[in-house]
Amino acid sequence: MRSRTTPVRWYRRDITGLRSIAIIPVVAFHAGASFIPGGFIGVDIFYVISGFLITTLLVTEAETSGRLNLGTFWAKRIRRLVPALVVTLAVTLPIAALLGSVLSWDTLATQAVASALFLANVLFWRQATNYFDTGSGQSPFLHMWSLGVEEQFYIMWPLVIIAVIWLVRRRLTLRATLGVVFGGVFVVSFVLSLWLTPTSPDAAFYMLPTRAWEFAGAGILALLPLDRMVTSRVAASVLGSLGLIVLVYGFVTLSEADRYPGYLAMIPFIGTILLIVSGSGARSVLASAFESRPAVWIGNVSYSWYLWHWPLIVFAAQIFPANPAAMAVAGLLSLGFGTASYYFVEQPMRLNPFLAKSLRRTYLVGGAATATVVAIAVGVYASGSVLLRSEPLATYAAAADTSPRDDCHGGIEQQFGGVEACILGDPQGERTVVLIGDSHAGHWGAAMDAAATEAGFRLVFRWKSACPSINVVIGTIQGVQNPDCAPFREGTMDILDAIRPDAVIISNAYGYDNRVFDTAGNKISLTEQRQRWRDAWIEQIEHIENMGSHVAVVRDNPRMPFNPTLCLSRLGSTPGDCVSTWQESHSIIAEFADATDEVITATGISSVWSVDDDICDEQICHAVDSDGVPVYQDQDHLSQMWTLRQKTQLEALLRDLVR
């Protein structure tokens, strides 16, 4: 046990420098640097550093005084984190609102408040936000998720240590007991991460329980007498070199295609641990680099730089779409913003004697600052609500609010072959048509219902989002197999076998490239994906035709490279600002569009429905039709108000099918 009078090596210049190789890769990755696809693991480096330093601080205080002063500890965190955060949020939110869609102002306001309360990680988990999505549509507050995880650690970790102090009573056993407790946290959290990464990737990525092992592992390290363990310059140099190699390996080999965190997060964890150990005793050959003035300076400004880098990159992507140079410039420019924040906000407030001498003043100022962000957010939220009552924003809002649902809204639930289906159109109609597919069948539901009612046909409607009707194994955008698709598809085929309808209309999205897996759920080449897609289509068409039913295929509609309704609902935006080239809108779905056309040709299907010519001319695809009606609900789904305008043509299609 360390005696009360033994000096503690608290400040580690090399660890401050180590922060530089955490922040630089993160910024480079977010700015679109292709040479560092694993730059996002810089966040894990920060976690390990925090776990080590905070545990060292808390355990030293516990051994010295036999207790922890929570009020003082949390007050220091408030002075360190809150001022710079609040300034960033207060500036970012109004700019994000002006650059973004009025439709998103409520979401932006909610995200800003969650960020101010260090709950952004929980919000983005609940919103199923994909961290690796890029482009102008991403939230400028997305990076705040990691601050939520870290602040939640700051709240929980001292409570864990206090509980151990209370349990052991005697300081002689404190470190040993803490080691056991930290070890338990490490094991449980790591196992949870391994379990949730493939099954619930958003929870695994964003939440503290699946990240706590990184902090706990570093906490275990903080309990060891490292200065007495690494006494050889050679050993320190070898450990440091290995740690750096491991981190570089992670930066260049990991990518958004990997299932992360899971066991792969061990790469930045091990690399950072080795570097921390290497600087604990004898001086390694890397010490000069990590203790150099540039490295330490970047490490000092890293928190403020992290706060500013992502909003500026997102704004650059909005102002200069598809311009990598603009994003790179924004990443560099954010260092200037971060530096100004460090010297004029972060440090002055952190060291302010007026606040440092009073816990009450610290908490009051911190609360008032947070309340300021909440007030700005309320203003943005309310302003958006008012604007959305005016035209044409009200029309665009209505178009965006017509997303297809998985229920039988407005229809009748009925079982066929023991499987429930939705009955639309004329339930007593003599002719039966079945519409099947994924959400791109779903967005035709209301229009098909109207057409079938007019024709006097019974329409059986069966669809599920992200589950095409054909027999292919589909994964989510995070690379996780969707377990709901196969049973839903089998139920659909049972319904068809039980009904043996006059006709079946198949409507599937084409945007599944790199999401079609083999039967074991493994990723396969794009060539093999196309082959499985073609084979599955042919299999389903032949099965339906063998029942004596006619088959019609709905070609997938063009997709916009942006969300059209969000574009239309920006302040000052016009329909002419929200168009896409023909090539852009079709290249997104080209792979499986070509494969499906090959199937149509091979099977001789003559009934093919397409809205291509209604949305696009020879060069441009439009987000609004000639009558000012929004075509899209979002980036790829058609709006209900537009599809209903196709009722007459759909009725003709239905009549031709059953003729």
Image (spheres, grey):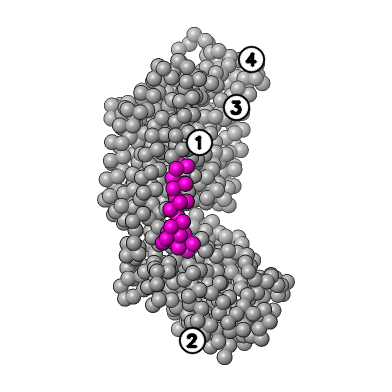
Q: Quadrant of residue 84?
A: top left
Work out whether 36 lies above or below 596.
above
Q: Which mark is residue 160?
A: 3
Disc 1, SS? loop
Residue at the disc numbered 2: 606
**Dot 2 surroundings within 10 Å: few (below 14), some, or many (20 or more)?**
few
> What secondary structure predominates along the stretch shown in magenta?
helix
Q: Earlier in the sequence, mark 3 or mark 1?
A: 1
Residue type, label 4: Arg
- The amino acid beneath tag 1 is Leu
Disc 1/disc 2 C-alpha distance (Å): 58 Å
Eyeballing the image, is 554 above or below 306? below
Q: Earlier in the sequence, mark 4 or mark 3?
A: 3
- Crowd around label 3: few <14 · some 14–19 · many ≥20 (10 Å): some
Amino acid on which disc 3 is placed? Val
Q: Are marks 3 and 1 in contact (CB under 8 Å)?
A: no
